[in-house]
Amino acid sequence: SEMIGYYNVSVILTYIGLLSSLFGMANLSVARSNPWAIKIAFLCLLFSGLCDMFDGKIARRTNRSPEAKEFGIQIDSLCDLICFGVYPAFIVTTISSKHWISMIAGALFVLGGVIRLAYFNVVENERQHQTSENRKYYQGLPITSSALIFPFIYAVEGLVNRYKPKIPIQIPSMNLIYTIIMFLVAFLFVWDIKVKKPGLKETVVMGILGLLIVVGILIR
């Protein structure tokens, strides 16, 4: 008998990104004994974001049945929830030693991500039945933005710690900053704002930023 599901090249990158996040999540279990665990976690998050950046482009160039397209939408959202919702929340709560405030922030972050993705699926399904054009704007902050936001904070934290003796101002606890950002991003997931879908220039800028973040993570 055949396996259920739709199997084609369009979902390969989606699955690779999911496996990257699961590996990073498992690696966090040794965060206290292995100083590289947090670095690897953020690098895995960045890699999952890289996979997500290109999986849609591959999907649009793949000849798929209407059912396979719908399956692709659902599988992409389910993997996004884990990679860019549950996984970042897990990282931040681990960094914050599972403080109750960070755990509340993480819970709201995942909840906001669930609502945003479910709403996107409904709207995207209707849109694809009405037009074949690519969307130009997102409603609410895309959940995949967390693949850049939190690694960026981690890389900047490393630079700040390196030059901290030269900075005369008092710097807030990074655990607090991670938690505040997580609250803010959770709100932006469900706030009805228009976010322009990245074009070629924006994609190149994000790619360069991603490379700089990788360097910042590795040298801290």
Image (cartoon, rainbow, N blue to C red):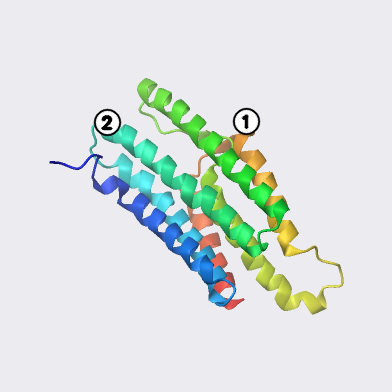
Instruction: Determine if residue 141 is in view.
Output: no
Identify the disc placed on residue 219. Answer: none
Q: Is residue 205 above or below residue 7?
A: below
Identify the element where label 2 is drawn. Answer: helix
Q: Amino acid at mark 1?
A: Asp
Q: Residue at x 47, y 54 (%)?
A: 49
Q: Nearer the viewer, residue 182 or 138?
A: 182
Q: Residue at x 72, y 74 (%)?
A: 161
Q: Is residue 177 above or below residue 80?
A: below
Q: List the single residue furthest toward the top.
A: 130
Q: In the figure, is residue 164 to the left or right of 118? A: right
User: Residue 185 at x, y = what percent?
Assistant: 64, 45
Nearer the observer, disc 2 or disc 1? 2
Question: What is the tally of numbered marks visible in this picture?
Answer: 2
Identify the disc placed on residue 67. Answer: 2
Identify the disc placed on residue 192. Answer: 1
Disc 2 versus disc 1: distance between alpha carbons?
29 Å
User: Residue 118 at x, y = what percent?
Assistant: 49, 32
Q: Residue at x 42, y 47 (%)?
A: 79
Q: Amino acid at mark 2?
A: Glu
Split into 4 quadrants, where in the image is the N terminus? top left
Q: Are marks 2 and 1 in contact (CB under 8 Å)?
A: no
Split into 4 quadrants, where in the image is the C terminus? bottom right
User: Residue 147 at x, y = what percent?
Assistant: 53, 54
Identify the element where label 1 is drawn. Answer: loop
Neighbours of disc 1 within 10 Å: few (<14), some (14-19), many (20+): few
- First in residue order: circle 2 vs circle 1: 2
Instruction: Determine if residue 132 is in view.
Output: yes
Q: Residue at x 48, y 45 (%)?
A: 81
Neighbours of disc 2 within 10 Å: few (<14), some (14-19), many (20+): few
User: Residue 43 at x, y = what percent?
Assistant: 50, 65
Residue 143, picture quadrant: top right
